[in-house]
Image (cartoon, rainbow, N blue to C red):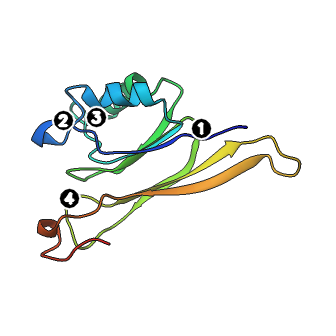
């Protein structure tokens, strides 16, 4: 039976909220997810070339990704299959991150359907300090 391996991940090292030390990359490599929903998606200088290098190293050169822009601690989605639409929704309660979303069409073998479509939203639960005392939930 076919399966899809999904992974939600906040695997950055240290207090700098970055994947630079490589610990999170090794966990992704070992887990072999088909789709990963990533929090604190910072790597290198955060340039397109650096983020592409991260995706290639952690998942493989055939994976596509979406990473929100303009956030201090961005969220993102990495997929074995093409991401056909993506974006972000503003969160007005915090200034350093938003909701990242992606639509992925997955080819499946079925009688009447040629694709399985699903949508993902990535957003970490907030701590009390992030929300002025309000708890996520």
Circles 2 and 1, Cβ within 8 Å, touching? The answer is: no
Q: Are marks 1 and 4 in contact (CB under 8 Å)?
A: no
Label 3 to label 1: alpha-carbon separation: 22 Å
Q: Which quarter of the rendering shows the C terminus?
A: bottom left
Q: For the residue carrying disc 2, how many other residues have a C-alpha within 10 Å: few (<14), some (14-19), or many (20+)?
A: some
Q: Quadrant of the N terminus?
A: top right
Q: Is residue 9 above or below residue 136?
A: above
Is 90 above or below relative to 109? below
Residue 92 versus residue 115 in the image, above or below:
below
Q: What kind of element bears circle 1?
A: loop
Q: Which mark is residue 81?
A: 1
Whether residue 5 is visible here, answered yes or no, is yes
Image-quadrant location for residue 15: top left
| Cα gap from disc 3 to disc 4, whole angstroms | 18 Å
Residue at horizontal 18 percent and vertical 64 percent from the top: 127
Q: CA distance from mark 1 to mark 4?
A: 28 Å
Query: Which callout, 3 or 1, points to the residue nearer the camera?
Result: 1
User: Marks 2/1: CA distance?
Assistant: 27 Å
Which dot marks residue 56?
none
Instruction: Report the side of 101 relative to 72 (left or right).
Output: right
- Nearest to the eye among marks 2 and 1: give it: 2
Which circle's residue, 1 or 4, is located before the other in the chain? 1
Q: Which residue is mark 3?
A: 47
Mark 2 vs mark 3, CA separation in Å: 19 Å
Q: Badge 2 is on which residue?
A: 13
């Amino acid at each position: 039976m076919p399966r899809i391996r999904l992974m939600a991940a906040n695997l950055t090292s240290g207090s700098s909220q970055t994947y630079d030390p490589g610990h999170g990359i090794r966990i992704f490599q070992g887990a072999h997810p088909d789709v990963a929903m990533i929090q604190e998606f910072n790597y290198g200088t955060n340039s397109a070339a650096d983020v592409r290098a991260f995706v290639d190293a952690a998942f493989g050169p055939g994976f596509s990704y979406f990473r929100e822009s303009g956030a201090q601690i961005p969220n993102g989605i990495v997929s074995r299959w093409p991401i056909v639409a993506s974006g972000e929704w503003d969160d007005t309660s915090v200034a350093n991150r938003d909701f990242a979303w992606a639509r992925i069409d997955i080819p499946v073998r079925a009688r009447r359907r040629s694709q399985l479509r699903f949508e993902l939203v990535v957003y970490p639960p907030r701590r009390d300090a992030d929300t002025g005392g309000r708890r996520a939930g």
